[in-house]
Amino acid sequence: MTMMVDNGDVHAATAVIQITEEVANLRERLLSATNAGPHELCKLVPFKELKSLLDRGANLLRHEGTVVDVTPSSGQEVCVVGDTHGHFHDVLHMLDLVGPPSDSRIYVFNGDYVDRGARGLELVT
């Protein structure tokens, strides 16, 4: 999640840092779970947290259209990602190579997020 930060807004900057740390922490826990096996997911990401994340994601997707217009501002890049098919490690590798979403980098993911890969739950989380 990226937030626009006004230069004078210390609270907003703190919120961005906190969200970034939470995402990094979640990424590491999901990666640890995939390396250890599916039985570890529920130990590293508690059910209540996992359900909350999935509910929030589903709510966001529910309100998106099937076609979304993306109009980048000057200096913004748009990274279009094809079907991920639940390949969690491939998406992490891509994010490591290209960089995370930010104010200057927008990601557009096409459909087929989880239809056949082994790590669909981790991917949509």
Image (spheres, rainbow, N blue to C red):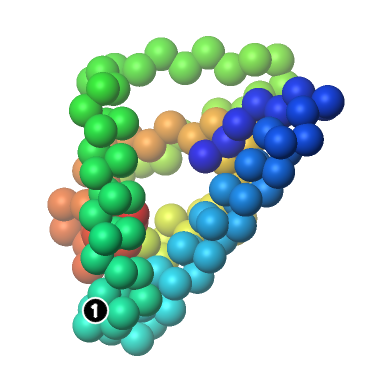
Residue type of the residue flagged with mark 1: Pro
Left or right: 76 with respect to 111? right
Residue 69: name its quadrant: top left
Task: Please state which of residues 47 and 100 is positioned toward the viewer in this rendering.
Answer: 47
Residue 86: name its quadrant: bottom left
Give me the residue at 37% from left, 76% from top. Answer: 44
Q: Is residue 91 visible?
A: yes
Q: Which residue is mark 1?
A: 38
Give me the residue at 30% from left, 69% from top. Answer: 46
Residue 3: name its quadrant: top right
**Residue at the extreme right of the image, as rendered:** 8
**Residue at the extreme bottom of the image, as rendered:** 36
Secondary-structure class at tag 1:
helix
| Residue 21 higher or lower than 99, as above or below | below
**Residue at the extreme front of the image, as rendered:** 11
| Residue 107 point in image, percent of width and height | 49, 35
| Residue 97 point in image, percent of width and height | 61, 55
| Residue 11 point in image, percent of width and height | 71, 36
Q: Is residue 87 visible?
A: no
Give me the residue at 30% from left, 40% from top. Answer: 56
